[in-house]
Image (spheres, rainbow, N blue to C red):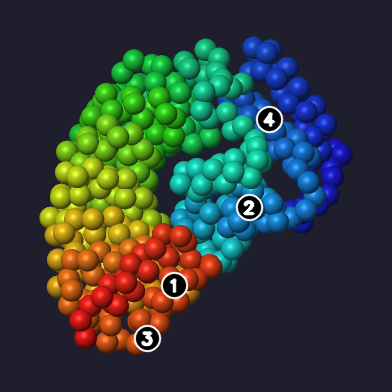
């Protein structure tokens, strides 16, 4: 079969014309009832996505993407192309779905980036990175291939697929073995097929069938089943309509809150990612706070692995935009937990963003003063950190200085700190907000009595 060499060094790829012919062949098989299988439908969807990507790359200029304003972090480490469907391995590394799936399908069990051995090769959608890539590409005038995951129908939208979907839901009820097998298959299908994710919104009672037959004790006794069900909810939450659907079915949010207390880091991480996705809606933020999610999210930040911490931080940052959730977070020791993460240099950029949000409340500022946070904040400010991290750091310092004149005197007596803030206030590489906040502190220093 004809192939072309990938100009970006990602290996050989099939030409758009070859892929188009394959799509035509597969669609013909789907039309013929006796040849319509789930495997054929899946292959058609994957081939159609490859065709869309190949056509997309044909339309781009040949200059490197990083010169088009696309950050290198948005390129798949394997294909060196912009990730259109970013997924996370168990070790936290992100890749585009098709290249990493091909890598794993060849029998490799080590991460291509770190060479770590992978005990679990399941792929979890990295929804946050996907949204950032879409935003960046829109700003640069680059159109991403349509993943067919929002509104449109796919080649697998026929009655046969929906019947099979309903049969999987029915299999969740009878025996534990059936539940496990059906849950694993639903997890895989909702991960790969937009049509199956949409079925949950179209089928009356589908969410109840998914979760209601399982008592809390059964879930606790079967961590693998709990992980699969939690991952299904995460996959469903990608679709905007499903976010609203879960708002009308609050037991889903209660289930996710329970999963935050799971025995496994992986399930807690998936639950946090799902809550982050649902928290995009303001109405869901209130429901999630009322359901008791905030304290468990803070526990995940304090005890989880890197991926879990990032997912929980993303969820918490959305939730505490509501004043009532902010108060709950502060009472749940969020300030202390986040500050200790920074002390240990764990996810500093994410933690600084959370701390800046919390510092809008004077109770959190009081806690930071008790922790003697200023020396640590000044130290982070002087480190080689992203501009947004420095911006959040100096914003927190400015709030403390506005609240406590003694802190201004403390900084005034520190020549290194004064020089750091003065430099930041005029730095061309700092964000405009960071410059303003640094200038505000410098002004306070100049006004304070010796």
Q: Residue at x 35, y 81 (%)?
A: 418
- From the viewer's perspective, tell me whether residue 59 is left or right of residue 435: right
Residue that label 1 marks:
424
In the displayed structure, does residue 125 sit left or right of residue 58?
A: left
Looking at the image, tell me whether mark 4 or mark 3 is earlier in sequence order: 4
Badge 1 crowding class, 10 Å Cα cut-off, few under 14, some 14 to 19, many 20 or more, is many
Question: Dots 2 and 1: beta carbons under 8 Å?
Answer: no
Q: Secondary structure at mark 2?
A: loop
Q: Looking at the rendering, in which quadrant would you find the C terminus? A: bottom left
The x and y percentages for residue 172 are 33, 28
Task: Point out the tag, 4 or 1, that comes first from the N-terminus.
Answer: 4
Q: How far apart are labels 4 and 3 at the CA level?
A: 58 Å
Query: Total of numbered circles in the picture?
Result: 4
**Quick check: can you spot residue 181?**
no
Crowding around mark 3 (Cα neighbors within 10 Å: few <14, some 14 to 19, many 20+) is few
If you read the primary sequence from the N terminus, does the residue marked by circle 2 or circle 1 appear first?
Answer: 2
Q: Residue furthest right?
A: 2
């Amino acid at each position: 079969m004809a192939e072309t060499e990938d100009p970006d060094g990602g290996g050989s790829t099939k030409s758009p014309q070859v892929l188009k012919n394959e799509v035509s062949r597969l669609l013909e098989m789907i039309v013929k009832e006796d040849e319509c299988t789930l495997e054929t439908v899946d292959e058609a969807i994957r081939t159609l996505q490859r065709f869309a990507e190949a056509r997309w790359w044909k339309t781009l200029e040949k200059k490197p993407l990083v010169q088009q304003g696309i950050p290198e972090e948005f390129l798949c480490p394997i294909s060196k192309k912009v990730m259109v469907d970013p997924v996370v391995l168990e070790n936290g590394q992100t890749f585009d779905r098709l290249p990493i799936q091909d890598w794993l399908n060849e029998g490799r069990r080590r991460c291509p980036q770190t060479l770590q051995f992978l005990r679990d090769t399941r792929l979890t959608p990295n929804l946050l990175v996907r949204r950032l890539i879409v935003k960046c590409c829109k700003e640069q005038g680059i159109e991403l291939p349509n993943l067919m995951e929002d509104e449109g129908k796919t080649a697998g939208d026929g009655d046969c697929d929906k019947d099979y979907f309903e049969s999987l839901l029915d299999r969740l009820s009878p025996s534990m073995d059936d539940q496990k097998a059906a849950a694993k298959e639903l997890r895989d299908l909702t991960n790969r097929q937009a049509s199956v994710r949409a079925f949950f919104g179209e089928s009356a009672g589908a969410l109840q069938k998914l979760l209601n037959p399982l008592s809390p004790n059964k879930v606790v006794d079967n961590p693998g089943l709990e992980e699969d069900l939690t991952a299904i909810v995460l996959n469903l939450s990608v679709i905007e309509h499903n976010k609203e659907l879960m708002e009308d079915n609050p037991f889903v949010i209660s289930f996710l809150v329970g999963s935050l207390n799971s025995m496994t880091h992986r399930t807690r991480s998936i639950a946090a990612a799902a809550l982050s996705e649902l928290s995009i809606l303001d109405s869901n933020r209130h429901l999630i706070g009322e359901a008791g999610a905030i304290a468990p999210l803070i526990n995940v930040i304090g005890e989880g692995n890197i991926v879990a911490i990032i997912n929980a931080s993303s969820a918490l940052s959305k939730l505490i935009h509501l004043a009532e959730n902010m108060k709950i977070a502060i009472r749940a020791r969020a300030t202390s937990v986040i500050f200790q993460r920074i002390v240990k240099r764990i996810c500093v950029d994410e933690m600084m963003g959370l701390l800046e949000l919390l510092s809008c409340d004077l109770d959190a500022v009081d806690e930071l003063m008790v922790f003697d946070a200023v020396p640590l904040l000044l130290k982070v400010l002087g480190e080689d950190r992203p501009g947004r991290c420095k911006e959040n750091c100096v914003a927190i310092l400015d709030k403390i200085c506005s609240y406590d004149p003694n802190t201004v005197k403390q900084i005034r007596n520190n020549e290194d700190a004064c020089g750091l803030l003065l430099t930041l206030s005029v730095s061309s590489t700092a964000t405009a907000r960071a410059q303003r906040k640094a200038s505000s502190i410098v002004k306070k220093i100049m006004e304070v009595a010796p």
